[in-house]
């Protein structure tokens, strides 16, 4: 059974670390872009049958899973011989906030908490999504894991984050939808950790037993 969200002891929290895709923004955009739209563009650009492209597409993507290349649009642009950033810009109007995300950010601001966005998204992806959502001004600092040459799943990410920002791990609340990322954060010793069980508005919430979880961030208010 999914664990209920805990009562957050805000007096013990100085800094809130928030993921972007699947935590604040609807993961539906990324699911659609990478599994539907980009294969169509790839097939059309290179004169290939869509069925042929789709047959090998998931295998092509999965070989880089949990590595920095998975999130790197420069990597995919080179590998696929496409301008992935330009293709994202063409469809950026489909980017959406998750329900309650903005209300939660306003709540954190009212509480006076330091707010850091920490995302595996490529810096160009962050800028494209900020163009649509105005996400970045909500934060004291926005950090792409590409700056540290290691994704959040990698144990090397977390000491680099502390060194660069001066945050105190035990006085941080971290919220993310990725279980591998949350496991890495827990192993590093962040103070409080919450999973988002409904990162994609078009999918049913996942059952999460490993971490306390919420379907919407407003449940933590």
Image: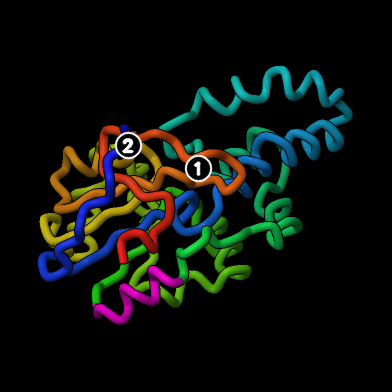
Horizontal side of 72 relative to 138 (left or right) equals: right
Is 106 magenta? The answer is yes
Q: Which residue appears at 32% of the width and 37% of the height? A: 2
Q: Residue at x 33, y 50 (%)?
A: 148
Bounds of the magenta segment: 103-112
Cβ atoms at labels 2 and 1 below 8 Å apart:
no
From the image, state whether disc 2 or disc 1 is nearer to you. 2
Q: Nearer the viewer, residue 149 or 27?
A: 27
Question: To which residue does mark 1 refer?
Answer: 71
Would you call the spot at circle 1 few (<14 residues within 10 Å), some (14-19), or many (20 or more)? many
Q: Earlier in the sequence, mark 2 or mark 1?
A: 2
Q: Secondary structure at mark 1?
A: helix
Disc 2 versus disc 1: distance between alpha carbons? 29 Å
Give percent across and percent down for residue 71: 50, 42
Question: Residue 137, which numbered label?
Answer: none
Which residue is labeled 2 in the image?
Answer: 2
Estimate the x, y position of residue 101 in percent, counting from the top left. Answer: 45, 64
| Quarter that holds the N terminus | top left
Is 148 displayed left or right of 9 in the figure?
right
Q: Name the image quarter holding residue 81.
A: top right
Q: Main secondary structure of the magenta part?
A: helix
How many dots with numbers? 2
Q: Residue at x 23, y 58 (%)?
A: 173
Q: Nearer the viewer, residue 212 or 145?
A: 212
């Amino acid at each position: 059974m999914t664990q209920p969200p805990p009562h957050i002891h805000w007096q013990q929290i100085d800094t809130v670390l928030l993921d972007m895709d699947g935590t604040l923004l609807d993961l539906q955009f990324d699911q659609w872009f990478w599994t539907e739209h980009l294969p169509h563009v790839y097939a059309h650009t290179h004169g290939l049958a869509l069925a042929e492209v789709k047959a090998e597409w998931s295998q092509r993507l999965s070989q880089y899973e949990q590595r920095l290349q998975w999130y790197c649009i420069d990597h995919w642009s080179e590998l696929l011989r496409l301008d992935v950033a330009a293709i994202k810009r063409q469809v950026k109007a489909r980017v959406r906030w998750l329900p309650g995300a903005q209300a939660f950010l306003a709540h954190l601001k009212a509480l006076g908490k330091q707010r850091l966005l920490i995302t595996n998204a490529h810096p160009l992806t962050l800028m494209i999504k900020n163009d649509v959502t105005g996400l970045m001004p909500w934060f004291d600092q926005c950090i792409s894991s590409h700056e540290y040459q290691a994704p959040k799943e990698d144990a090397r990410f977390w000491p680099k984050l502390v060194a660069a920002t001066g945050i105190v791990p035990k006085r941080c609340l971290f919220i993310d939808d990725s279980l591998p990322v949350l496991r890495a954060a827990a192993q590093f010793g962040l103070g409080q950790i919450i999973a988002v069980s409904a990162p994609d508005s078009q999918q049913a919430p996942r059952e999460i037993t490993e971490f306390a979880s919420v379907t919407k961030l407003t449940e933590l208010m």
